[in-house]
Amino acid sequence: MNNESIKPVRKTRDQFHFFLNIQTRWADNDIYGHVNNVTYYSYFDTAANSLLIQHAGFDIRQSPLIGLVVDSACSFFQELSFPDIIEVGVAIAKIGNSSLRYELAIFKQHNIEPSAQGHFVHVFVDRETRESTAISDEMKKSLEPYLLTPIT
């Protein structure tokens, strides 16, 4: 097996149906003058949870279920730095019994090509027992409009 990394195919803005605008902060920059790589994961987390809250009626404080991140990745294409305003595109790649796989892309405001893209997997568990729990049919149905649009 070849150990060279496979360059990801960049997603385009039109593949996403939910966007969250985020103002980068002064504190997001690192010593090299650009947004530190770990901050991109924070943007992903914020955008994915915003989709759940705004469009699936997910109550992060009272829901008997919580989503735990079990897998994530990010590919970087272009630097971001304060004071960039970014738009995080979120799409659902797969709706499982108790999991959601999100595809995410971070765009500088008004750009068509992403500065970074990645994925994020939530497994939903009971808030108290932490046992895997099925996502409700209602939540699944509310997320269907956000399924990833394939590249044509």
Image (spheres, helix red, strand yellow):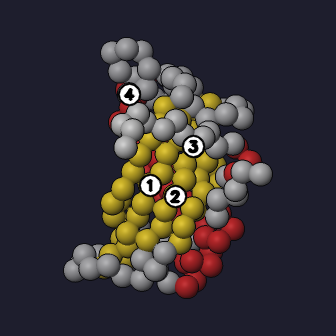
The amino acid on which the numbered mark 2 sits, given as a three-letter code, is Tyr
Q: Mark 4, mark 3: which one is toward the viewer?
A: 3
| Residue labelled with disc 1 | 120
| Residue labelled with disc 2 | 102
Q: For the residues marked 1 and 2, what is the alpha-carbon distance in whole angstroms?
A: 5 Å
Q: Residue at x 69, y 68 (%)?
A: 145
| Residue labelled with disc 3 | 105
**In the structure shown, which secondary structural element does the residue marked by tag 3 occupy?**
strand
Q: For the residues marked 4 and 3, what is the alpha-carbon distance in whole angstroms?
A: 16 Å
Residue 26: name its quadrant: top left
**In the structure shown, which secondary structural element does the residue marked by tag 1 occupy?**
strand
Mark 1–mark 2 CB contact (< 8 Å): yes
Q: Residues within 10 Å of mark 3 (few under 14, many from 20)?
A: many
Q: Nearer the viewer, residue 7 or 65?
A: 7
Horizontal and vertical percent for residue 28?
40, 28
Horizontal and vertical percent for residue 83?
53, 23
Q: Is residue 62 above or below residue 102?
A: below
Q: Mark 1, mark 4: which one is toward the viewer?
A: 1
